[in-house]
Image (cartoon, grey):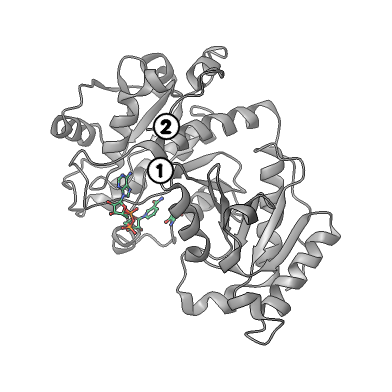
Amino acid sequence: MPERPESEPSDSERSATAPSVPALALTLGEPAGIGPDIALRAWEHRAELGLPAFFVTGDPACLRARAARLGVAVTIRECAPEDAARLFPDVLPVVPAGPVVTAQPGAPDATSGPAAKAAINAAVRLVQAGRASAVVTNPIAKSVLYAAGFSFPGHTEYLAFLASEPAPRPVMMIWSPELAVIPATIHIPIAEVASRLTRQLLVETARIAARDLQHRFGIARPRLAFCGLNPHAGEEGTIGREDEDVTRPAIEALRAEGIDARGPFPADTLFHAKARVAYDVVIGAYHDQVLAPVKTLAFDRAVNVTLGLPFVRTSPDHGTAFDIAGTGKADPSSLIEALRLARRLADVDRAGALAPLPALAGEPA
Ligand SMILES: NC(=O)C1=CN([C@@H]2O[C@H](COP(=O)(O)OP(=O)(O)OC[C@H]3O[C@@H](n4cnc5c(N)ncnc54)[C@H](O)[C@@H]3O)[C@@H](O)[C@H]2O)C=CC1
Ligand SMILES: NCC(=O)COP(=O)(O)O
């Protein structure tokens, strides 16, 4: 369980100085997964950890059943989002959304997908209406949602779709104090990675990362390190051409517009402790290339943040963990860090508007 630094005010103390600040909207996630468990555990530790106020969007009966199963002493109160911050010290506020859930821990059913999706929709609507400060999502099971007809790879792309018209390009960053990483391609088959890794994708991803790291994370000149796709970053084009033909020109284009882009570096030597001091974020070619290192270093502390959205969205770094749902074994630490980071980023956004990105016209294809 993460500790609160003693010298700093807690997030709830900070929020208390601004009484009209809306609470965070936390989605139920996959109801058969550990989302309900970790939401309850986070609320249980709210006072000792000084957590920012949040409310859950989803089926209140599902949360009550999980609390009973886990033996968590909590009153779950259905309320309007505006009342959540005031109620949070005493009860777990819930803004009802979606169908009544029949799925049991570890066993998703036909109510899982609609319940998870409705909880996301409600949280986004509330943040867009200024009735929530940020969206924090509990894990969803992609395959369960796909089976229910969900046509987006994950939250990241769905949130961009809900965000505005036309949808912004969303960028997935897994952030931890030890290491921050961005997969340029996300949930696609490995066989498609090389063909979908374009200069335009890398340039747009890096621009969004540089802007959000500067304006939301307060890094004056973010250092972006690019991973090569091939072993040894292609060994000067002798082990695959992508690093020379795609990644290197993207880095040169970014440097020409003043972004501190570096590489491409061989992935196998980019994540050890000495290498990590030389950059602020790694942009990798594909999901497992960069998520495996960050989850190895900081599984219980890393937070998934969607960059490029007009609102703040964070999430724990882990999935639904069906194997331990409802058993009391789920560790809420990553969710707790996600709640803290969401509060901080939302406060930054409230203090100043996000800078617009440069025009994308005329980008190299
Ligand atoms: N943000 C999201 O919505 C995410 C959703 N997923 C989804 O989760 C499902 C399961 O994915 P997996 O690859 O099995 O990863 P997983 O993270 O759910 O589980 C991997 C292992 O870590 C353990 N674990 C995970 N979180 C834990 C916690 N908080 N405390 C203690 N142990 C924990 C699990 O018990 C399991 O043994 C998939 O359907 C996937 O789509 C996966 C990652 C993120
Ligand atoms: N492996 C990360 C993950 O699955 C999270 O995806 P998303 O639902 O946040 O798009």
Seen in the picture, residue 192 relative to 349 is either above or below; the reply is below
Residue located beneath label 1 in the image: 300
Q: Position of residue 314 (x, y in %)?
A: 49, 41
Is disc 1's CB within 8 Å of ligand 1? yes
Q: Quadrant of residue 243?
A: bottom right
Helix, strand or loop at mark 1:
loop
Pointer 1 and pointer 2: residues touching (CB < 8 Å)? yes
- For disc 2, the marked residue is 2
The C terminus lies in which quarter of the figure? bottom right
Q: Earlier in the sequence, mark 1 or mark 2?
A: 2
Q: What kind of residue is marked 2?
A: Pro
- Res 68 quadrant in image: top left
Question: Type of residue at label 1?
Answer: Asp
- Give the crowd class for mark 2: few <14, some 14-19, many >=20 residues within 10 Å: few
Give SS at disc 2: loop
Q: Is mark 2 within 8 Å of ligand 1?
A: no
74 w.r.t. 340: above or below? above
